[in-house]
Amino acid sequence: MRTSVIVPTYNEGKTIGKCLWALRRQTFKDYEIIVVDGHSKDNTVEIAKKYADKILFDEGKGAGAARNLAVKAVNSEIVAFVDGDTTVPENWVETVDKVFKKGIVGVGGPLLPDGGGFSDKLIFFVCADLLRRTSSALGAHQFSGANCAYSREAYLKAGGFREDLDMLDDADLSMRIKKFSKEKFEPKLYAMTSLRRTKQKGHVKTIKEYLRGYISLLTTGMVKKPSYLREIKKD
């Protein structure tokens, strides 16, 4: 099945080359790379032009809005998402294709730290692998926007990413889209992502903010953007 891999970016010049190079060398061939840029002020777009099949521009309304814009602009059966500071193995799109041939409408996998030490790997294993694996087994999927894919048809029926959420719009979508058919947490669909958030703010503060976010989303349907996310630097 044809797959569009969508990468939202804003000032990702230091990481986007590595991200797109990994996407460009996929074993599966029936796919395209779509970069949606929020008018970056660095060299993100210049680098993206070397690898992407198409570059779109949004108005800087956030990653969710950028992803929605791209999904409406493509015709592929599957829409997949990777962040600009994230890299995937060469069989990533092939793994997505195999999962969807089993009648799945949504898939996500674990996130691994790109570098770091034992504590980083342990935290990611618990929070970005074990908890997501467990929640999916209970039917409460929590896919990361940095590593997931959906049937375009189901995605549009669900309304895509909520643009009024400041965070956890990815978890919200995976919870909403399950009403259309089966979703799956696939351990083989892994991705490696930047440690810049935890390096700057620490594991404890990051985990606390996400826990507060989940509680707010489940109890009120909304999430206020933590101040620490606004302070994250793209380095």
Image (tube, helix red, strand yellow):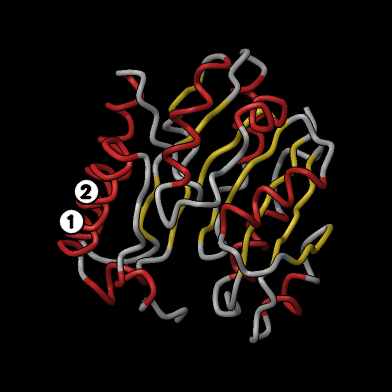
Neighbor class of circle 1 (other Cα within 10 Å; few <14, some 14-19, many 20+) is few
> CB of mark 2 within 8 Å of CB of mark 1?
yes
Q: Give coordinates of residue 125: x percent, y percent.
A: 26, 45
Above/below status of 145 relative to 201: above
Element at label 1 = helix
Q: Quadrant of residue 227?
A: bottom left
The one of 88 and 134 positioned closer to us in this rendering: 134
Element at label 2 = helix
Above/below status of 220 relative to 106: below
Q: In the picture provided, is 107 more to the left or to the right than 93?
A: left
> Mark 1 = which residue?
208
Q: In the picture provided, is 27 more to the left or to the right than 137?
A: right
Residue drawn at (37%, 46%) of the image: 222
The one of 135 and 120 positioned closer to us in this rendering: 135
Above/below status of 116 relative to 178: below
Above/below status of 175 relative to 52: above
Q: Quadrant of residue 9?
A: bottom right
Q: Name the amino acid, label 1.
A: Lys
> Mark 2 = which residue?
211
Tell me the quarter of the image containing the C terminus: bottom left
Residue drawn at (64%, 41%) of the image: 80
Q: Give coordinates of residue 151: x percent, y percent.
A: 67, 28
